[in-house]
Amino acid sequence: MKPAAFDHVRIDAPEEACALLAAEGDDARVLAGGQTLMAVLNMRLAAPRMLLDISRTPELDVLREERGTLYIGAAVTQARVGAYPGLERAVPLLAQALPHVAHLQIRNRGTVCGSIAHADPSAELPLCLTALEGEVLLRSVRGQRTLAAEAFFQGMLTTACAHDELIEAVRFPLAAAGAGYAFDELAVRRGDFALAAVACIVHADGIRFAAGGVGDRPRAIDWPRLEGSALDDALNAFAWSLDAHDDTQASAAYRRHLVRVLGRRAVIRAAEATT
Amino acid sequence: MKRSAAGEQTLVAVVLNGVRRSARAEPRMLLSDFIRQRLGATGTHVGCEHGVCGACTVRLDGVPVRACLTLALQADGRRIDTIEGLAGPGGMGALQLAFRRHHALQCGFCTPGILMSMSELIERGPRPTEDEVREVLAGHLCRCTGYTPIVRAVLAAAAAMRGDEESADA
Ligand SMILES: Cc1cc2nc3c(=O)[nH]c(=O)nc-3n(C[C@H](O)[C@H](O)[C@H](O)COP(=O)(O)OP(=O)(O)OC[C@H]3O[C@@H](n4cnc5c(N)ncnc54)[C@H](O)[C@@H]3O)c2cc1C
């Protein structure tokens, strides 16, 4: 339960990380909050030769509103975002979802971008980014690029981030005027990964609904304003489309059930929150 | 950019419970092992070493974190508070006394981590609700108590620290 030996590099600027990622290839790994990676190293599920520690990189420790989004740099912890003044109004979905991400003691070090990079299918933050149609800002020695969430997440623990790329930041769109937002999940214990999680945005023209923990990545769908049995039918069809699997935690049927039940509640709650 | 090669011992300077301390650590050394083996503060316990159990929780620059998921080098230049710092010159602190009085521990293995999380909760606000206590406690596993006495002890300790003796006895 101790990590294999590695070089530790304290990164002072993003370019340093990009240069080392380009030079060292797969031997180098970015260390952000370490709340996933350190556990992986302790269990020796991975043994990179070099860790690029961005947890104290000032240029990446940026949290601000810009161009209608909340810009969250790669060193910003989940706890810091959770404590952002007015988060309930700025990005209501994040305010609702963050308390479900692990525990306070983990959020104090875990970063938002690290969770996006790890792309656990049950993780709350990738679900929120997908539901809100947020963006991931990538950087390498080859240049910078911005990907939409749905293009970024490619499957179980798999993203479009290339081996030489650093996630510099993510952008969560700020709340749209009049729209209502709701997040909900079911986990065995508070702070555990979700068996299923849902996120919903209701606006004047329709509903955007997303689910996590069921398929291999968060999935979203757009509907017109639905109610009653039409909503039930849409939720049911969506639940079946997610390609749920049985595992030790829950059966596929139970996960579909959660999408229908949590989904209905979330749509109703989001609709009530519209103004 | 500061590079420490694998196996190379680097000096790590911290303020442990208010006292400046420094010792050497190689890059792969966990903060939990650094505190116990290099600084000799063995009150911080090592349980699962993958962040789940919470036994190794310490306060880094004031906030509770998992020492097993933090590298010793990452604590360089920072403040670390551990269970050893909770007792005052006159003996155990209010939180510790409440844990004893309310039978909030049996084997005691998880207790140091829980106390570090709870000391921060009470510092953040002197009147934590039961829900808030349970929320913070969710980050810790205790296999002896069933948690109820722990919740009771934290609420009583907070009351005692506010000088609210009546509710402390309840
Ligand atoms: C007990 C426990 C419970 C948890 N429960 C939950 C939960 O309920 N929900 C949940 O979502 N998460 C949970 N987590 C995981 C937690 O949220 C992690 O913080 C998060 O998944 C990873 O963020 P990090 O900053 O710690 O990343 P790290 O652990 O540092 O890195 C994770 C991975 O992403 C890569 N990476 C990190 N940052 C970048 C970057 N900027 N660019 C490129 N690659 C990068 C790393 O190389 C590594 O492969 C839990 C963790 C623990 C220990």
Image: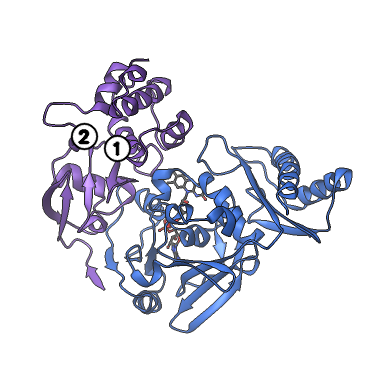
Work out how far the residue at label 1 is from the one at label 2, CA to CA, in angstroms.
8 Å
Quarter the N terminus of chain A occupies: top left
Q: Quadrant of residue A74?
A: bottom left
Q: Which mark is drawn over residue B116?
A: 1
* SS for callout 1: helix
For mark 2, what is the residue? B86
Q: Is residue B71 above or below residue A259?
A: below
Quarter the C terminus of chain A occupies: bottom right
Q: Quadrant of residue B163?
A: top left
Mark 1 chain:
B
Mark 2 chain:
B
Determine the colour of chain B.
purple
Q: Position of residue A123 (x, y in %)?
A: 56, 51
Crowding around mark 2 (Cα neighbors within 10 Å: few <14, some 14 to 19, many 20+) is some
* SS for callout 2: loop
Evaluate if marks 1 and 2 touch, with contact meaning CB atoms under 8 Å apart. yes
Q: Residue furthest bottom?
A: A142
